[in-house]
Amino acid sequence: MTDTPDAPRGFTVRRAILAILGFQVGMAVVLAGSDLIGAIPQLLTGPRAPALDAPVAPGDQVRRFRPGDLPGRERLSPDRQTPIPDPGDMPSRLRFTAEGETALVTGDIAPGDAERFTEWLAGADDVNAIRLHSPGGSVTDALIIGAALREAELNTVMEDGDICLSACPYILAGGVARTVPDSAMVGVHQHYFGESTALPAFLAVEDIQRGQADVMAHLDAMGVDVRVMQHALSTPPEAIYVLLPEELAEYRMVYDPSEDETASE
């Protein structure tokens, strides 16, 4: 009986390495498939959070958010008894309507709206306050509009049932005085910066970080506590963190300059 020659050692080692690599790839596929299967419900329905119009409470402030899924025509006031009418449907880009000394600025914040707003503001001599009702939109335009409001020394206000979400709070922050009733809704979340989805990962991250730096610099310049960004950065774009009245006061998102003057006397 003739013995079969042993396989070359190098061949055996290569087979072992390939087997290990094959096992690792297989495990990676299985794990990725498990993660994908677990994520499918969230991809289809959004984050596991209540609807936007569900009442909020301390520690329960994250709500599902898609700009098209805004609160209905009626929402309950904080006492959960009195219906508050929604001011109306949202235009697809900002609409400016002067109502005496207060102008209603409502709708999605679309790219280019900052230029439209600054041109409109130049002719709005009688306006001293801007009322906001917007689900947000372009962060860059919101920052420019907010800075323009501060330069013009205008106040920002909201009324019962108004919403100011996503990028809108950066406009709200631009007011010299900022008034938000308890029944209005102000919310923040993560943002997309730039429109290209084909950027390399390191460029996309750099773009996001630069955008967040611009946001924080704006809030700081407007006198708003940048700690509000901890809620924005921890809330995904498909959700919104609704700020409670006490948080709006703590972060100086609502602000009355006369209170500082009184305290300094």
Image: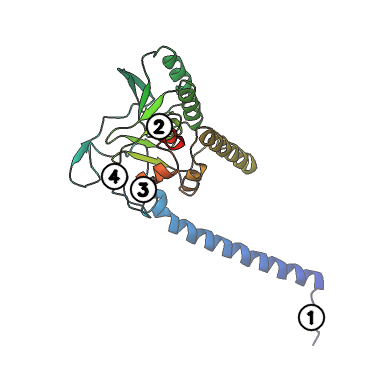
Q: Callout 2: helix, strand or loop?
A: helix
Type of amino acid under label 3: Arg
Colouring style: rainbow
Report the residue marked by disc 4. 53
Residue on which disc 2 sits:
258
Q: Is residue 264 left or right of residue 29?
A: left
Q: Amino acid at mark 2?
A: Ser
The first of marks 1 and 4 along the sequence is: 1
The residue where tag 1 is placed is 4
Q: CA distance from mark 2 to mark 3?
A: 34 Å
Of residues 200 and 108, the one nearer the viewer is 108
Identify the image quadrant of residue 59. Answer: bottom left
Which numbered disc flags the more N-terminal residue, 2 or 4?
Answer: 4
Q: Nearer the viewer, residue 12 or 249?
A: 249
Q: Secondary structure at mark 4?
A: loop
Q: Where's residue 228, x and y in %? A: 47, 44
Mark 2 or 3: in front is 2
Question: Does label 2 or label 3 sit earlier along the sequence?
Answer: 3
Q: Name the residue beneath numbered marker 3.
A: 63
